[in-house]
Image: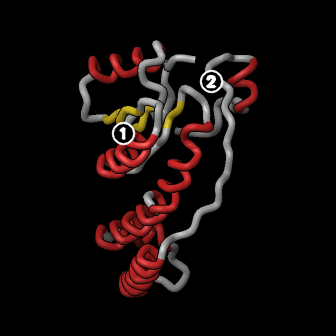
Amino acid sequence: FGGTVDEVTIEAAIEEYEVLSPYNYYIHMVSLNEDERVEYAERSSEISHLYHKYRSEEEESLLDVANRYWDLQQEIFDRADILKECEEKTRVTHELFDSIGSKTIIFCNTTDHARGVNSRIGKDSNRTVQPFLGEYSDEKRESFLQNVEEGIVSALIPIDCLTEGIDGPA
C-alpha cells in the first residue's frame, strides 16, 4: 500500500472534520476467576509448546510462526477470548450499566457472549438493551438504530458490526 498518505488525530476527527463523536473511556480493572486463570495458563503452555515445536529459527517471532500453523493461531485466539469474555467484565458492566449514558454501546466478542451480556443486564435494568448482530438483516439493524434514536432502546450489544464506525443517533 505504500507509505502514510495522511494522519488525522482523534481530536481533529471530532472537532475539525466532524466525522467522529466525542466519547469517554473509563477503565475498570478486572481479574480472571480461578477457572479462567487455569484455562489461560493451560492455553499459554500449549502455545509455548507449539511455538517451540514449529519455529524454524531461534529468533522467529510467535506471530510469524502462528501465521504458518493454524493450530497455534487458534490457541492464541482461544486464549485471547478468555480475556475478552471474562466473567468479571460482565459483572462490572452489569453494576455500572444503569449509571452510564442513555445511548450506550457494549461491545462483545461472540454471539453467545452478546446474548449472555444481554440476558444478565436486561433482566435487572430499567433500561432496554438489544443485541445487534451481524447476522441480522440490514432492515432489522436499521430498525434497532431507529429505536435507539427514539429512546425505545438505550443500549446496543454488537458483534460483527459497529466496530468501524456508524452513523448512529447522537
Give the Cα distance between marks 1 and 2.
20 Å
Residue 89 at x, y percent in the picture: 51, 56
Front-most of 86 and 160?
86
* Sequence order check, earlier mark of 1 and 2: 2
Q: Residues within 10 Å of mark 2 (few under 14, many from 20)?
A: some
Q: Is 109 located above or below residue 73 in the figure?
A: above
* Corner quadrant of residue 47: bottom left
Front-most of 165 and 101?
101
Asked if residue 11 can be seen in this view, the reply is yes
Q: Amino acid at mark 1?
A: Asp
Q: Secondary structure at mark 2?
A: loop
* Corner quadrant of residue 124: top left
Q: Residue at x 40, y 40 (%)?
A: 122
Q: Residue at x 42, y 69 (%)?
A: 79
In the image: residue 103, left or right of residue 139: right
Q: Is 145 located above or below residue 163 in the figure?
A: above
Q: Secondary structure at mark 1?
A: loop
Q: Residue at x 40, y 50 (%)?
A: 109
Residue 57 at x, y percent in the picture: 48, 83
Q: Residues within 10 Å of mark 1 (few under 14, many from 20)?
A: some
Asked if residue 51 can be seen in this view, the reply is no
In the image: residue 52, left or right of residue 104: left
Quarter of the image with the C terminus is: top right
Q: Residue at x 69, y 36 (%)?
A: 24
Residue 148 at x, y percent in the picture: 45, 20
Q: Which residue matches tag 2?
A: 20
Residue 128 at x, y percent in the picture: 42, 30
Q: Give me the disc on residue 64.
A: none
Q: Which residue matches tag 1?
A: 160
Q: Amino acid at mark 2?
A: Leu
